[in-house]
Amino acid sequence: MTFSLRHVGGLWGLLLWLFLAAGVLAADFGFHIIRAELASEGDDYVLNADIDYQFSEPAIEALRNGVPLTLVLGLKIKRVRTYWWDETVLNERRQFRIRYHPLAKLFQLVHENGGVPQNFASLSALLDAMGTIRRLSVLPVDRLRHGERYRASLSVWLDIESLPLPLRPVAYVTPAWYLDSPRYQWLVAD
């Protein structure tokens, strides 16, 4: 059997089409921040947010097969300035890991900065809990000056670098593993 240039070009065209089709299918998945706000509570500003997590099938399959998934929540707060670049007041990343324990048939949420792991009987219960952030302390009230304007932004993404080493090359070339949210921005009320 011999291959001509036309066959090779057709093969590359098929591979390109499959890659693009996979990207279109993966577009149904991702994370969406529905709302976010900073509220002053006592001596701190706290974050309240609602996030819709839609994982792709490869990510759910990996999770169900014992692969922990690490997600990163990125929060930035900048002081808005007229004649200079905006000043960054806070640039923080918080990681949390989700995993599945097949013997116990439990999903688990673990915050990397400590705290007690939370267990859930179903994936939907886990996603609901992850998507409801309430009273997450982010910075002291005195870090924001009264009378100044501040802009906050929030985003969340799957950390591909934290996947097990054998899975990373597949994740890098598969669009279904690029799970993240568009940046959600809002002005912080004084």
Image (tube, rainbow, N blue to C red):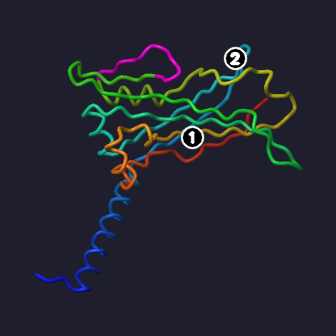
The disc labelled 2 sits on which kind of residue?
Glu
SS for callout 2: strand
Is 75 left or right of 106, judged from the image as shown? right
Q: Is residue 167 above or below residue 115?
A: below
Could you say where residue 82 lies in the image, as x and y percent from the top left? 87, 48
Depth order, front residue of 4/127 = 4
SS for callout 1: strand
Could you say where residue 102 lies in the image, as x and y percent from the top left? 22, 25
* Mark 2 burial class by Cα count in 10 Å: few <14, some 14-19, many 20+: few
The disc labelled 1 sits on which kind of residue?
Ser
Could you say where residue 188 lies in the image, as x and y percent from the top left? 73, 34
Residue at x 84%, y 28% (from the top left corner): 145
Magenta stretch contains residue 89: no
Depth order, front residue of 2/98 = 2
Upstream in the sequence, badge 2 or badge 1?
2
Is 150 left or right of 73, judged from the image as shown? right
Residue at x 44%, y 46% (from the top left corner): 179
The residue pinned by badge 2 equals 41
Depth order, front residue of 28/64 = 64
Magenta stretch contains residue 112: yes
Q: Which mark is residue 31?
A: none
Is 60 left or right of 96, judged from the image as shown? left
Residue extending furthest left?
1
* Mark 1 burial class by Cα count in 10 Å: few <14, some 14-19, many 20+: many
Tell me the magenta residue range. Answer: 111-121
The quadrant where residue 12 appears: bottom left
Residue at x 33%, y 42% (from the top left corner): 59
Is 30 left or right of 67, judged from the image as shown? right
Quarter of the image where the C terminus is located: top right
Question: How far separated are the C-alphas under marks 2 and 1?
Answer: 22 Å
The residue pinned by badge 1 equals 155
Mark 2 and mark 1 in contact? Answer it, CB < 8 Å.
no
